[in-house]
Image: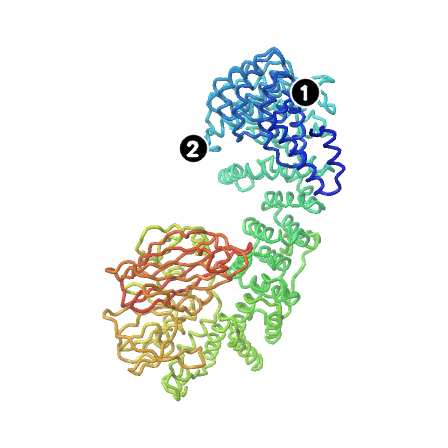
Amino acid sequence: MSLKLRDLIRQVRACKTAAEERAVIAKESAMIRTAIREEQEQYRHRNVAKLLFMHMLGYPTHFGQLECMKLVASPHFPEKRIGYLGMLLLLSEQADVLMLATNSLKNDLHSENKFVAGLALCAIGNLATADMSRDLAPEVDKHLGSAKPYLRKKACLAMARCLTKCPDMVEDFVDRVVSLLNDRSHGVLVTVVQLMTRVLVMDRECHLAEGGDDDGDRDYESPCRTAFLKLVPSLVKLLRNLLSMGYSPDHDVGGISDPFLQVQLLTLLRLLGAHNAKASEEMNDVLAQVATNTETSKNAGNAILYECVQTIMAVESDDGLRVLAVNILGRFLLNRDNNIRYVALNTLAKCIADRQPERDEHDERDVQHRGPDAASSDNSAASALQRHRTTVVDCLKDPDISIRQRALELIYHLVNRENVETLTAELLNYLVLCPREHRADICTRVLQVVDKFSPSDLWRVDTLITLLTIAGRESAANVQSSTAVYISRSSEDLRAYSTHKLLKAIRDDDGSQRGLLNVGIWCIGEYGDLLLTPYTYHPPSNAPNSTGLPDVDGIDSDEAPVSVSFSALDPATVVDIVEGVTNRHTCPLEVKQRALTCFAKLRERFADVADADTLDKLHKLVRKSEGSQSLELQLRSCEYGALINAITGVSVKLTTAGGGEEEDIFGGGGLGGTTPVSDSVRSAAKEALARMPVVDIKLMQRKRDERSGDMSEDGMGVVFGGDDAGDSVPAASGGEPSLLDLDDIFGGGATLAPAPAAAPPAQNGNANAAKKSEPAAQSDVDLLSDIFSAPVASPAPIPGGFDVFATLPSQPAAPAPAVNMFAPQPAASALGSSIVDPFSSSPTPAMQPQPPPAVPSPAISSPAPTMSAPSPTPSVSSSASSSITVQGFTHQGLTVEFECSKTDAWNKQHSLLVAKFINKTDAPLYGLHLQVAVPKYVTMEMKPPTSTTVPVTAGSSTKLVTQRIEVTNTMLGTKNLMLKLKASFTSKGNKVEHLATCSGFPAGQY
């Protein structure tokens, strides 16, 4: 015999460990199963009660579901009550045995006992499925007209469930719902209003499911909504009666008359008044009455006011009501209860965000018709919100992190041109105290605010520098790049101020603010010559914030004007400060890379003002990284060293592949470097280290559009393939030259436009004259290409390598094929051509010469831009007789390999490339997106990847993520296949983007 319920509870409470409790429950469960199997009807209700207790403790009780069905069918009310309770708790609407209860529910709905019928209505309201709703809806409808309020209110809740499951039955019961609104029972009124609210919500959901627009279809009116709109006067009257009702002990809660019904009525009015001016006008007076007459000393009153504010913000109310609603939320902000303050902050932010498009449209219209000051003056609700700005700012000092985050979100919406300086200073103050995981988002938001509402260029730049000083370690790359762009586009006076301030910030920093170091070192390299002269800023005396700087120290900005002065520095001090940054053991690689470029540019900036020791030190710092483990530092160190040698006129001699002889890499004309460097080479080297051209904002916007997926830009001479590139599209030609025109990289096309600035120095005898005739400014073009991209003309072109510094012969020669200067360099051919690698210490092994191409190829142009990271030397390994594997790139744990094969034996130009993504990190990579650019002579068809999540590649059992790319090289045998790759993915929460060039495909095969 099993235990009684009270005895089971005592035994469970007496257990001292979880194991003892499990043993007791397991023993009792076995006894209950035995009783169920033996059909012990006298203990059925006791067993179900004990199963309910076990269910509350979290133990499985599914074996007692049929016992609940049997108790529901019992004629005795105590057993039926336990059965319904068990059915509501132990069953869900997905349970198959629930269909067995339909007949019992129908019988109980016809019972004369109102409590039995009430149990059935409760079960329908909680568990009814679509089939049960259709079968039982007529019986539920009969109880809607019952004479007993107890059954009417339960029938309303049950009908709400039935109409939710079967929306097509709504129109059949609208009239019945309308008639119930005149009921005298408050319990019935609450449930009727809930039913009407549910019908309106469901009607809107059905409209949206059919393709409607929640904001666009403002005139949409369904039969249900039309019928309910006629009841707005009745609902308003009912709400007004509740406000004027005296004390009623049956409905009074904390001095408020039936707050539950008031809240439900306000919710229903909000749904009816949305996008309906007539209904909103009818309810404006009662909303104002609720907002002004409701007592706020109790939570019941606060709940009504909160719902009233939401209704005012949702309906077509006038500005006066909106001001009243904002003031109510402002009083909520002064409440000591954090829950009420959180609700107020959240509601304010939501209301502002929801009405932002309307406010922007209204402001723009007023500015066009009445002037720039009309918009802010007319928006009285926004003005009322600005009056509570101080209270919102004080919430940033609250110890509760949720309050601070809500206040921070609201402050973003409060910023305008009048208060941008004050609120930005508060944001910077909060940035000092906030958790580190929130700083990146705050930095991005501050950048958006500064970009949109900045009163002056000086204030914008100074705010961003202060931001980087506080949170440079957490700032995103777009914050750093935007700061550099703003400085580069500013006046010379502002550049001097920015450079002086950044140098001081770098000197005082402990090396932890990575973003500050990146921007500061870049700025010092570009404008280091401005540090050699003193700088003083005299603010205008009539400026409200005369310094133009953000008030991050709590200093009153209305004080007398303060001048900002910086003393002049000598070149050695500037170099020592940057060198000190790179010598820290915590200095990241990207900062070292920028410092290397900074040293090279300072060598050119200080050439006429620094002493010999400083210049020699800069040259040594540039060449210090020639043996670095980083390929990027190695390559740039060699390149910058060659540029400095070219500027100083020093010949660089390298041993040829045959050994014994030396050759000048700048093509001086004689062996041993006896001839000095030509003026054209020296001029090109100086231009390569000149100031960066001003950034084109339109170009940046176009690159942003491309990153967002729009890769089909006019004027691009390549085919960009993304995950959605499913069709074979030939590359477009033409367009103005730009950094994005990859035709300049691949050398495709029959004709080439003349170089926009510096031509290769040793192209022909008129190189110097051509150089002087070209303009000095060169927008977005790699200036290093002027030195490192001179093509070689030889009787037998050798695919895969050429002498980038050799002097061209005087006689005309056939153009050279398109090559990659970073590809493996073969040795000289048997005809005597010398192939020299200027960055290697040993000769390149010999290689058999290739026959000349049948069709001459156009000359190549500039290689890839210097600022992009070079891809590692591609390695080709033969994986099978019919396919080869080409290394694409490896970056931050992601390796991309291409398995190349010929799918069509009759079409040698067509090839299949299967990209394989290998994850060598300890965590999956998410959001994988690979884009591929090809030259004009190649057509491409790209399929989506098998997955955008790359799992950790642990072994041969790991399923690799792949992506199919089909290419057709229309100039096979003349030009080799080359790919420009752009990969983006998320690694451990950080967004990673990488550019690389893949050109290691076998010559003549692909």
Quadrant in the picture for the N terminus: top right
Q: Residues within 10 Å of mark 1 (few under 14, many from 20)?
A: some
Observer-nearest residue: 895 or 139?
139
First of labels 1, 2 by sequence position: 2
Q: Could you say which quadrant of the image residue 794 lies in?
A: bottom left
Quadrant in the picture for the C terminus: bottom left
Q: In this picture, is 922 found above or below 268?
A: below
Observer-nearest residue: 984 or 358?
984
Give residue 969's position: percent from left, percent from top.
Answer: 29, 61
Marks 1 and 2, how far apart at CA: 41 Å
Q: Which residue is mark 1?
A: 243
278 horizontally vs 5: left or right: left
Observer-nearest residue: 522 or 928?
928
Q: Could you say which quadrant of the image residue 196 lies in?
A: top right
What amino acid is at disc 2?
A: Gly
Q: Residues within 10 Å of mark 2 (few under 14, many from 20)?
A: few
786 horizontally vs 167: left or right: left
User: Which residue: 31% across, 53% down?
Assistant: 729
Colour mode of the rendering: rainbow
| Residue 236 in view here | no
Q: In this picture, is 163 found above or below 778?
A: above
